[in-house]
Image (cartoon, grey):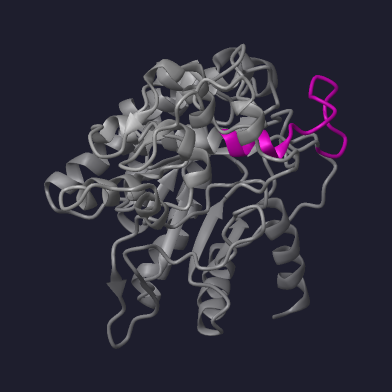
Amino acid sequence: MDEILARKLRILADAAKYDASCSSSGAPKRAAGKDGLGSTTGAGICHAYTPDGRCISLLKILLTNYCLFDCAYCVNRRSSNVRRAKFSVEEVVTLTVEFYKRNYIEGLFLSSGIIKSPDHTMELLTRVAKSLRRDHGFRGYIHLKSIPEASPWLIEEAGLYADRLSINLELPTEASLERLAPEKDGASIQGAMAQIGSRIAEAKAEHRRFSPAGQSTQVIVGADATSDEALIRKSAHLYGSFGLKRVYYSAFSPIPDGSTILPLKAPPLQREHRLYQADWLLRYYDFTPDDVAEATEDGMFALDVDPKLAWALKNRHRFPVDVNRADREMLLRVPGLGARAVDKIVRARRHTSLRLDDVARLSSGLKRARPFLIAADHRPTGLTDRLDLRARLAEPAQQLSLF
């Protein structure tokens, strides 16, 4: 690699590190033919993760960190005093192919600042994916960040070549966007999400290929005063209205020469962790937005207990539940029991009456579940009502990673 290209790579890989949505889950199984290159598996291709849960097996770069916009929270904003660089389409294609051949990566995550115009930027991003697919037979994973202000037909074309498209919502309210990113329009962002969501649904129904791994978005946490409850309600709206695959929560990180309207300190990473846990309650545990909101205190999740435990402690009258009789929906609300463990319990109890040791073999979370469960040999008389139950189950005060 020549020195100029290496310098660009250092700048533009570093500039992409603030984007959390680099998971490749949901991609279909795919293998290259005799003259092709790359493959994916049904479980996705991200096998290596950083300590905070972010994938490192994708080539994760910006096409450029030049940008016409001046979003206050962005290190690459127009007024920022950072080193700038720009890849050509051919350079990104070459890096992807060569890195894949050396087994450095298994796919590409490509975003960009806005240069010249949204249409021009979206066209360049799509040309990268198109060249990889058509000119090099690349069958690996490709995730493109879509530009919401770009023409709909350009986003349509991108979906033909990318496994996943995503558009960053950035901030959950119009008021926050107007204050911190006045050049962005929330209606345009959600309009583009709706367009992608509709096309994905149509393609599935017609058995055609269009962004087969779905679409995702990212929300910045802590750059404004939005509460956890408001963030989760916004996510529920996005899942329900646009069929998003994932909403990613990215804790705001103070940037060099940041605006005075920004917070001086980053929010605790534990807050980000709690939001992901609450998000899973929506997607996998049959919690409604109102249920999740009930787990908050003044709109914020506690840092010492997870949202499901917080909900259970506020609803002690619904516990303990009988592991041998309770329906699946109620078992999913027992702290410490994951969705897979609940399914194992439901299957196992068809053949035998479950004892506490049986539950321990089916779930690793028995310590938290025990006060909330009745088993054949266990009835927690008075335990669920203990005043010190929260203190007994609270996590040690420490900064946890995302996953």
Q: Is residue 256 visible?
A: yes
Residue 218 placement, left or right of 381? right
The answer to whether 38 appears left or right of 92 in the picture is: left
Closer to us: 333 or 222:
333
Along the viewing direction, whichever of 270 and 230 lies nearer the viewer = 270
- Residue drawn at (67%, 58%), measured in percent from left and top? 51
Q: Which residue is most to the left?
A: 206
Which is the main secondary structure of the residues drawn in magenta? Answer: loop
Whole-percent x and y of residue 213? 34, 52
Name the residue: 47% across, 39% down. Answer: 370
Is residue 123 part of the magenta span, yes or no? Answer: no
Image location of residue 96, percent across then percent down: 53, 72
Quadrant of the image containing the N terminus = bottom right
Q: Does residue 64 lie above or below 286 as drawn?
A: below
From the viewer's side, name the closer residue of 216 and 84: 216
Residue lying at 70% horizontally and 39% vertically, measured from the top left:
269
Q: Is residue 268 magenta?
A: yes
Residue bounds of the magenta highlight? 255-274
Figure quadrant of residue 78: top right
Direction bottom: furthest residue: 34
